[in-house]
Image (cartoon, rainbow, N blue to C red):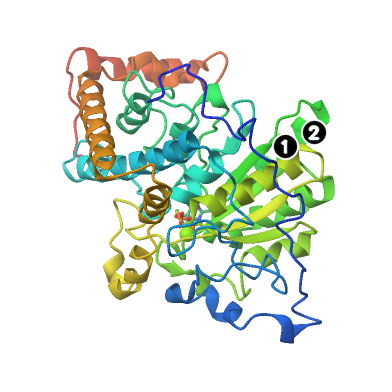
Amino acid sequence: MASEGSAPFLFPDADAEPPAKDALVPDVVDPVTEPESVPEMVPEAMPEADAVETSAPAGPGMAADLGLYTVLREDGTADPTRDPGLSDAEAIALYEQMLLIRNLDTRCLRLQRQGRIAFYGTSTGQEAATVGSSACIGADDWLFPALREGGAALMRGMPVSRYIAQLMGNSHDEQKGHQQPMHFSFRAANHVSLSSPIATQVPQAVGAARAAQIRDDGSIVLAYMGDGATSEHDFHVAMTFAGVWKCPVVLICQNNHWAISVPVKDQTASPTIAVKARGYGIPGVRVDGNDILAVVAATRQAVERARSGDGPTFLELVTYRRQGHSSSDDPTVYRDPAEVEPWEKKDPIDRMRLYLETRGIWDDAKEAAANEAQSELISAEIKEAEKAAPPALETLIADVYATPLDCLTEQLEDVRPFFEEGQTAEGEFPL
Ligand SMILES: Cc1ncc(C[n+]2csc(CCOP(=O)(O)OP(=O)(O)O)c2C)c(N)n1
Ligand SMILES: [Mg+2]
């Protein structure tokens, strides 16, 4: 497990063959002038959960932003024309990272139910999208996450202890408890905290990419968003400027089919989310987000494009939110549970496990050992985190202004007796 200060897991592997530059944009079909060439699956592919056809890769005759870029096949092998060529160690490391998120999600949701943390949002079923994409950049690159990319910080070297400290807002939390749980940031790898207002991080990410471009420092930016975020004006603003300036940014939409209780078919009338990129002059690619090899292959090529000055790429990673929006949500009141089943069959961890077993590098014993080690680590870190003190009282006003305003200092002195002398207030709470 990565410890603080250790080098993040880096891609691409120096020995790996670079992917063909144009491989992601096969024979683009224009749906307006050549409607007969658009494959039939396209209109239903986004609205219907069970219409996602993981065995139908985008290929000749199918536009990359209307088809589905897939590498893993149902028999557990990889399409040799798109295989990103991971080494054994890389393939196993990616798998273990997905497993870690799944194990953390299970444990942390339980912590919330027990009242030990205030809030949690799982990414169950979306692990391949988060791990596969974030594995493709280096420590000097930047990552602007949305709600479900906490695992990206772990992927890039953030220790589990810090993940749990953030959820508890204790004295080990990098943000001193200022943020709501799930707003992880990891300065060592330029992982910026998520912005709660949906999509506001996208123009910020494009701005950071523009800065990198002006400074010519060689770094690139990954900007994440959900399907719901693509209806926000900030999405439009960010895509416009990314396209015009040809910023070194990879814009990644995790289309998990829901924005709290709003299904994606009520979110947009566009046949896919990826195709929206055309309007901004940005290549869009629709990728099977539950296929980690496809996510790696597509993101690597997009990163390469950004790094070499060819501009942005927009990736729609097609996946599914199998649980509630967050620990505060109950999806059974607005969603038919039967909709979830087909997605359980496309579980990204199961699919990668089958691939590893078919490749002969994984088995039941290794699975049990990995789960046991992760479970022990998580238990130990929760225990440690619960022993940690809360942040010092002074941190209430720290990191807001370079020099705290007088009014903040006064307010701090007002509340001090409540903490230091156990003084109680008049009145009722909640107010
Ligand atoms: C500007 C704004 N409007 C509404 C909300 C409330 N809100 C929080 S998450 C969310 C849905 C986000 O859906 P999506 O972008 O698809 O991401 P997902 O949670 O599915 O990963 C909404 C509406 C908000 N945080 N910000
Ligand atoms: Mg969503």
Q: Quadrant of residue 107?
A: top left
Q: Quadrant of residue 294?
A: bottom right
Residue 104 percent across, percent down from the top left: 30, 39
Looking at the image, residue 6 lies above or below residue 295: above
Q: Which image quarter is the C terminus in?
A: top left
- Residue at left 49%, top 27%? 186
Residue 300 percent across, percent down from the top left: 64, 44
Mark 1 → mark 2, Cα distance in angstroms: 6 Å
Question: Looking at numbered disc 1 in the image, what kind of residue is underneath it?
Answer: Ala
> From the viewer's perspective, is 389 left or right of 143?
left
Q: Where does label 2 land, which residue?
A: 213
Asked if ligand 1 lies within 8 A of label 1, the reply is: no
Crowd class of label 2 (few under 14; some 14 to 19; many from 20; radius 10 Å): many
- Are discs 1 and 2 less than 8 Å apart at CB? yes
Q: Secondary structure at mark 2?
A: helix
Q: Where does label 1 land, which residue?
A: 209
- Residue at left 40%, top 19%? 3
Q: Is residue 364 visible?
A: yes
- Residue at left 20%, top 19%? 387
> From the viewer's perspective, is 153 left or right of 350?
right
Q: Secondary structure at mark 1?
A: helix
Residue 89 percent across, percent down from the top left: 46, 34
Give the camera-side residue of 196 and 205.
205
- Residue at left 40%, top 56%? 351
